Amino acid sequence: MTRTPEQATFRLIELLNARPELAVIFMDIALELLRAEGLHPDWSTDAAHALGFLTEEVGGRAEAVNEFQADSGDPARRAQMNDRAMQVGTMAVRCLLHLQRIQISNPQRSQASKRCAA
């Protein structure tokens, strides 16, 4: 669904009033996004490469979950799980922000994939 920034802002305020804990999560993701963009301002236009950024963070989150389980719910491991989940959220937002610039990684491979799917 497409909304104007004004419509989105109004709806976001409604959402945050209903679920105030989301404000902390969204703020943390926004702050991490600004930090990440400062460190790595360029974003790949290659679809597979951009996906790699996100899947790397998902892998880090899976590793943090495994460590949390292995350490019987250690609070430090819980914090690590939270940090890694925030990284996943940040990379997902970056993917969405740059979606219009994403291109096909390998046109020949894309055509071969279409033939295999048919």
Image (spheres, rainbow, N blue to C red):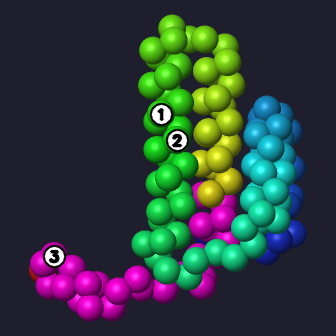
- Say what secondary structure mark 3 lies in: helix
Which segment did they paint magenta? 92-117
Check disc 1 and report the residue beneath it.
63
Rate crowding at label 2 as few (under 14), some (14 to 19) or many (20 or more) other CA atoms within 10 Å.
Answer: some
Q: Earlier in the sequence, mark 3 or mark 2?
A: 2
Q: Gap in Å between the C-alphas at discs 1 and 3? A: 33 Å
Tag 2 residue = 60
- Marks 3/2: CA distance? 31 Å
Q: Is residue 3 visible?
A: no
Q: Quadrant of the N terminus?
A: bottom right
Residue found 26% across the figure and 84% down from its top: 109
> Amino acid under label 2?
Gly
Disc 2 and disc 1: Cα gap in Å?
5 Å
**Type of amino acid under label 1:** Glu
Q: What residue is pinned by disc 3?
A: 117
Q: Position of residue 80 (x, y in %)?
A: 64, 29
Can you give x and y, in whole percent of width and height, for residue 40 in the image?
Answer: 72, 67
Whether residue 35 sits left or right of residue 60 in the image: it is right
Between 25 and 56, the one lying in front of the other is: 56
Q: Is residue 96 left or right of residue 10?
A: left
Please, is residue 82 above or below residue 73 in the view? below
Residue contact at pointers 2 and 1, CB within 8 angstroms: yes
Name the residue located 47 percent from the left edge and 63 percent from the top edge: 52
Q: Secondary structure at mark 2?
A: helix
- Residue lying furthest front: 39
Query: Magenta span: helix, strand or loop, mainly?
Result: helix
